[in-house]
Image (spheres, helix red, strand yellow):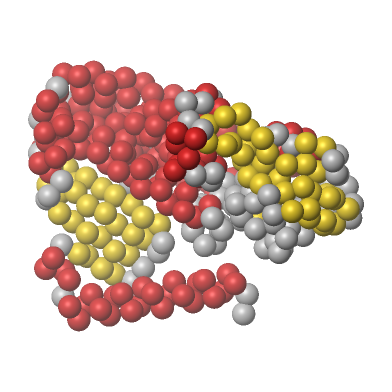
Amino acid sequence: MPDAYLILVAIFLFWMILFIIAKYLKLEKYGFDIAPFFLMYKTKRFNKLISEIAQKSPKFWKTTATLGVAISYAALGYGIMVLLRNLINVFVQPQNASPLIPIIPGITITGNSIIYVLIAIIITLVTHELAHGIAAIAEGLPIKSAGLLFFILIPGGFVEIDENFLKKVPSRCRLRIFSAGSAVNLVSALLALLLFSNFALVLSPWYGPPIGVFVTDVDPNSPAYFKLPPSTVIFAINGTPVFSDVSFTLYLMNVKPFETLVLETSIGTITLTTSINPRNPTRGYIGITYPRPFYLPYPSVWWLGMSFPAHLYLTLFWIFIVTFSVAMFNMLPIYSLDGDKIFEEIIRNSISREKMLKIGRKPYSQRKILVNGTRIAAITLLVANIVLPILTVGFTPL
């Protein structure tokens, strides 16, 4: 049975067993809500913490949330532009088209990447929901509960705001609350980008300059799989020193399939023959995924270890990818997303409820036509960016 089917069977059995145990132990009375492939834990324990943070400086949080509205609008515009451009590339420049891949650990995300992605998801969700909660309390709205949820293998989080109070506050307050999550995710993404873009500078107090390439993960279907285990350091290829991931990648760009490479590594001299690169059949492939520069720690911080920089970089990299992607996706006008709530709020303020449009002989609300039409367009754009690039250029798990 292929690995993908084994993973699906394991997921199915896990959720069935969890569902049976939950019903037998009656976990509902402890705040758990469990259904097939879905688990939610609801509690009021976080309410006090969120309230204390928000009430220390409500004016600051209101001002920040107002800026968040503008940031969220920018995220929506940029997200739509990226999706449209990618869709155009499918037909005009297929080699530049990228599939929009949902994050599903074990299926679309494999290998050691799963650990970094899960860390990034947790940070993204916690900061997103915390921002919603702080913005709500700063506007004087009570929080009913907060909690965590899992759908299949995808974790989530939520802050439950009292809808009755939410309806009574001015429109500008609702906009600040709805946009707070995506705004914080964008700020987190930019901070992570700043850190890993200047990574050598960030490490400089504790590590020297790079002297090789650190192997973080290896493709199981590649020539390097049995010869270069993770944590191996590569110092040279065919006598050419490789001081960083950039020099390593540049060297491999000129390597053809079925060439013999002699690698000087931390575990000795390794000889291997390249295979065909799955992304470009004209290039050779050895199968090292996410190579990172290898830094030696200074003697005073030897306890940090040799692999710490690689793990830190990949964590920052995935925090950027996940937080940025969630901010873009969450601002789309698709039902239940924050972007949909913001769009509805804007339409409600722009178009009167009494305005109708006749289609045939039957009148329809202009509000509903515009909102539902925009939702359909957004879903179509999203699905097209998932399906068409995969059909055109294929898909390789990350």
Q: Nearer the viewer, residue 183 or 189?
A: 189
Pick the front one: 198 or 342: 198
In the rendered image, which quarter contains the N terminus?
Answer: bottom right
Residue 273 picture location, percent across and down: 85, 57
- Residue 244 coordinates in the image, percent (x, y): 68, 35
| Left or right of 62, for residue 157 | right
Q: Position of residue 89 (x, y in %)?
A: 70, 37
In screen coordinates, is 221 left or right of 331? right
Q: Give the residue displayed 10% in from the left and 41% down from the top.
A: 48
As drawn, is 367 to the left or to the right of 160?
Answer: right
> Among all residues in the image, which is located at the extreme front?
299
- Is 116 left or right of 17, judged from the image as shown? right
**Residue at image point 14% right, 40% down:** 49
Residue at left offset 26%, top offset 34%: 131
Report whether residue 328 is seen.
Answer: no
Residue 34: quarter of image: bottom left
Q: Is residue 55 visible?
A: yes
Q: Is residue 216 above or below residue 368?
A: below
Residue at figure coordinates x 74%, y 37% from the top left: 242
Q: Relative to 174, does residue 389 appear above or below in the rendering?
A: below
Work out whether 4 lies above or below 334.
below
- Residue 167, position in %: x, y? 15, 36
Number of marks in picture: 0
